[in-house]
Amino acid sequence: MLKGLTLNFNDWLQRNTIIRNLEFFQDFIIISLCLGLFCVMLIRLGDMFFSFLRG
């Protein structure tokens, strides 16, 4: 009985670790996409600003 309970507890801990790692990876992807979109927005804004100065 105790051995089965210990195995279930270890499985629960491992599942928790896997979920935590997947959430970290998901957060990393979202943050990198947001930073990339922000950089593209800054490039477009700079291009628009310089076109107003030239025109």
Image (cartoon, rainbow, N blue to C red):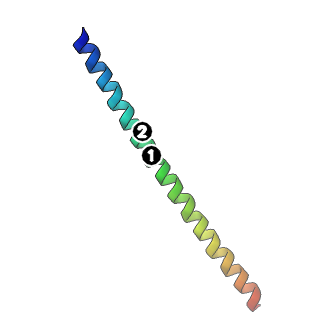
The residue depicted at 52 percent of the width and 53 percent of the height is 30
**Image position, residue 42 (x, y; %):** 64, 72
Q: Amino acid at mark 1?
A: Phe
**Image position, residue 2 (x, y; %):** 25, 11
Asked if disc 1 and disc 2 are in contact, CB closer than 8 Å, the reply is yes
Is 54 displayed left or right of 2 in the figure?
right
Judging from the image, what secondary structure is the residue with disc 1 in?
A: helix
Residue at numbered disc 1: 24
**Image position, residue 55 (x, y; %):** 77, 90
Is 19 displayed left or right of 31 in the figure?
left
The residue depicted at 25 percent of the width and 14 percent of the height is 4
Crowdedness of circle 1 by 10 Å Cα count: few (<14), some, many (20+)? few
11 over 54 or under it: above or below: above
The disc label shown at residue 20, or none:
2
The residue depicted at 22 percent of the width and 14 percent of the height is 3
The residue depicted at 42 percent of the width and 38 percent of the height is 20
Q: Amino acid at mark 2?
A: Arg
Judging from the image, what secondary structure is the residue with disc 2 in?
A: helix
Q: Residue 22: name its quadrant.
A: top left
